[in-house]
Image (cartoon, rainbow, N blue to C red):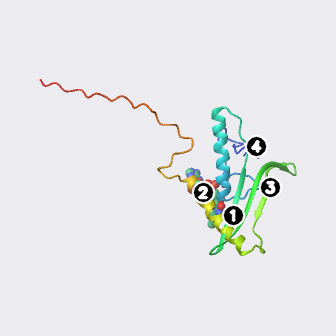
């Protein structure tokens, strides 16, 4: 990977490497990291195809756990391209984490946030058949001309 500029392979032209296959520290090798990286790669490819500048990297990872009914804990981190010890990396920035001192209300909110996050993620990954994708082209307003049937002549 061309860390941290893009997820393009350093070995194969026009191939992107993401998820568990990518070397992208500080990001953990997790499903949520892979999803976040996939969004960046998709945006990069769309920008390249359209000949537009890339929008930059906005990456995060989420770790949610349900510890009891109505009680959840979380560890959420964001990542930005940077450098550590002379090595280019995706540096962890803002971190939002549960603590042992969290009140029951905070745990309850984490639980609700967990479910909401999961619902949003699965809705984005698996849109319902009746939902129109965001970037879908508008359907043609003009109906295609009807084809006239040819009658067979009797001999
Ligand atoms: C036990 C366990 C628990 C986990 N729990 C969590 C969790 O709670 N939360 C979380 O975020 N992450 C969790 N993870 C990590 C998460 O599953 C991975 O980080 C995530 O699946 C990575 O996605 P990926 O698409 O990069 O790779 P994968 O999901 O591994 O997908 C790669 C796919 O490529 C296929 N493949 C491999 N070689 C070839 C080939 N030569 N040709 C064609 N296809 C090929 C594989 O069969 C596989 O389907 C867990 C992992 C494990 C093992």
Image height of 132 relative to 153, above or below: below
Q: CA distance from mark 2 to mark 3?
A: 23 Å
Given the current orientation, which residue lies at the most extreme left position? 155
Residue tagged by mark 3? 93
Mark 3–mark 4 CB contact (< 8 Å): no
Q: Nearer the viewer, residue 114 or 48?
A: 114
Q: Nearer the viewer, mark 1 or mark 4?
A: 1
**How far from the left and from the top, in percent, is residue 128?**
50, 53
In this rendering, is residue 45 above or below 145? below
Count the marks: 4
Task: Give the residue at mark 4.
Answer: 5
Residue linked to disc 1? 63
Q: Quote the CA–CA distance across marks 4 and 2.
A: 27 Å
The residue sitting at the right extreme is 85
Mark 1 touches mark 4? (CB < 8 Å):
no
Query: Which is more N-terminal, label 4 or label 3?
Result: 4
- Mark 3: few/some/many CA within 10 Å (<14, 14-19, 20+): few
In the rendered image, which residue does mark 2 sit on?
A: 120
Q: How far separated are the C-alphas under marks 1 and 2?
A: 15 Å
Q: For the residue carrying disc 2, how many other residues have a C-alpha within 10 Å: few (<14), some (14-19), or many (20+)?
A: few
Residue at image point 68% right, 68% down:
109
Asked which secondary structure carries label 3, the reply is strand
Q: Position of residue 78 (x, y in %)?
A: 75, 55
User: Of marks 3 and 1, which one's residue comes earlier in the chain?
Assistant: 1
């Amino acid at each position: 990977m061309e860390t941290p500029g893009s997820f393009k392979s350093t070995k194969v032209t026009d191939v992107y490497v993401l998820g568990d296959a990518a070397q992208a520290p500080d990001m953990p090798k997790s499903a949520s990291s892979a999803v976040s990286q996939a969004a960046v790669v998709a945006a990069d490819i769309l920008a390249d195809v359209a000949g537009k500048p890339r929008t930059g990297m906005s990456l995060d990872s989420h770790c949610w756990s349900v510890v009891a009914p109505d009680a959840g804990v979380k560890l959420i981190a964001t990542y930005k391209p940077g450098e550590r010890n002379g090595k280019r990396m995706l540096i962890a920035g803002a971190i939002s984490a549960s603590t042992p001192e969290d009140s029951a209300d905070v745990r309850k909110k984490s639980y609700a946030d967990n479910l909401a996050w999961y619902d949003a993620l699965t809705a984005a990954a698996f849109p319902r058949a009746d939902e129109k994708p965001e970037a879908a082209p508008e359907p043609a307003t003009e109906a295609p001309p009807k084809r006239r049937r040819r009658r067979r002549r009797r001999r």
